[in-house]
Image: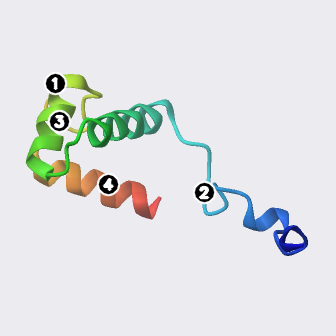
Amino acid sequence: MQDRYLTPCYLDPHQARSHEPTAYENLLGDSIERAFGSGITELDALVTFLNDQGPQPQTADTWTTDNLAEELKRLAND
């Protein structure tokens, strides 16, 4: 009964996407998911995880809390 109300536009998990993610965006997202999956919930620990596991930031040699926050903000607005 409820299926008739679920039109395809409500079933698209990527409906807000403006473009397909780049390889870098996919790698970063996968790495963040692995960090969360391993129980990491604090920003400092996430930065350490990303520096150990990758990917490397595009604008610096290593992740910091500042450049990670800037990158996530940029990706959210992209």
Secondary structure of residue under mark 1: helix
Report the label total.
4
Q: Residue furthest top?
A: 53
C-alpha distance separating marks 3 and 2: 26 Å
Mark 3 sits on what residue? 60
> Contact, CB < 8 Å: mark 3 with mark 2?
no
Q: Which residue occupies the foreground of this view, 73 or 4?
A: 4
Q: Residues within 10 Å of mark 2 (few under 14, many from 20)?
A: few
Mark 4 sits on what residue? 72
Mark 2 sits on what residue? 17
Q: Residue at x 23, y 24 (%)?
A: 53
C-alpha distance separating marks 2 and 1: 29 Å
Pointer 4 or 3: first along the chain: 3
Pointer 1 or 4: first along the chain: 1
C-alpha distance separating marks 4 and 3: 15 Å
Q: Quadrant of residue 5?
A: bottom right
* 44 sits left or right of 4 in the view: left
Q: Residue at x 24, y 56 (%)?
A: 70
Q: Residue at x 26, y 26 (%)?
A: 54
Q: Which residue occupies the foreground of this view, 57 or 14?
A: 14
Numbered badge on residue 52: 1
